[in-house]
Image (tube, grey):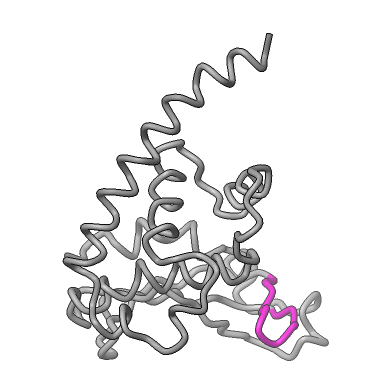
Amino acid sequence: MRHLQYTAKSHHLQWNMKQLSQICSKLYHDYCPDSLKHRRNRKLSKVSDESLLVLLLLQDELGIKSQRHFYRICQLFPCERLLERSSFDRRARQLIRQELNNQISQDTIAIMDSFPLPLCQPVRNHRAKIFNGIADIGYNASKYLWFYGFKVHMLVTLSGYILNYVVTPASVHDIRVVDDLLENCR
């Protein structure tokens, strides 16, 4: 019974793939930059750029958020010529970002990152009394080190202009302060 349900939906999928393929081919030839279309060894690739765009649009149409999950679904289809997952991800990012980087000026993109502001050496993390109740212990992943103190979260343009910053206790993750950072920024 489940097989019948699947075949009923597969006709819809075939129609969508054919239509998506025509649309992607036209968009690729009209809007893709020449540096990407005429790159070295493009003809040796297993999957064409147009087919990769079709797969990405299909992923969006099916509502699949994770590219890893979508790649696993693609492995179920009987196509021998699918890329490895890392190549699939890299080429997908390259196709999408190439045009975006050309259209967006550097000051319309902002980068959010944080850095630690330790108040003492790691040996004294649990004995420190300075800023007791305000500061706490957090983890610096780049140095594989626990520290006691604060964390500075910054929103910076690509040209180096600081748009906004927030100082929080060390244990606060970057995602928790996004709304505060974006509050007064255009």
Residue located 34% across and 72% down the image: 97
Q: Residue 27 appears at what percent x and percent y?
A: 22, 59
Residue 178 shown in magenta: no
Which quadrant is the C terminus positioned in? bottom left
Q: Is residue 15 left or right of residue 85?
A: left
**29 or 96, nearer to the observer:** 29
Seen from this angle, which residue lies furthest top? Answer: 1
**127 or 102, nearer to the observer:** 102
How many badges with numbers are in the image?
Answer: 0
Q: Is residue 98 left or right of residue 143?
A: left
The quarter holding residue 50 reads bottom left
Q: Is residue 18 above or below residue 86?
A: above
Q: Is residue 82 above or below residue 110?
A: above
Q: Residue 154 appears at what percent x and percent y?
A: 39, 77
Residue located 35% across and 56% down the image: 179
The quarter holding residue 110 reads bottom left
**16 or 109, nearer to the observer:** 16
* Main secondary structure of the magenta stretch: strand
Residue 145 shown in magenta: yes
Q: Magenta segment range?
A: 137-147
Q: Residue 174 appears at what percent x and percent y?
A: 50, 65
Residue located 26% across and 71% down the image: 100
Which quadrant is the N terminus positioned in? top right
Q: Is residue 31 above or below residue 128?
A: above
Residue located 61% across and 13% down the image: 4
**149 or 9, nearer to the observer:** 9
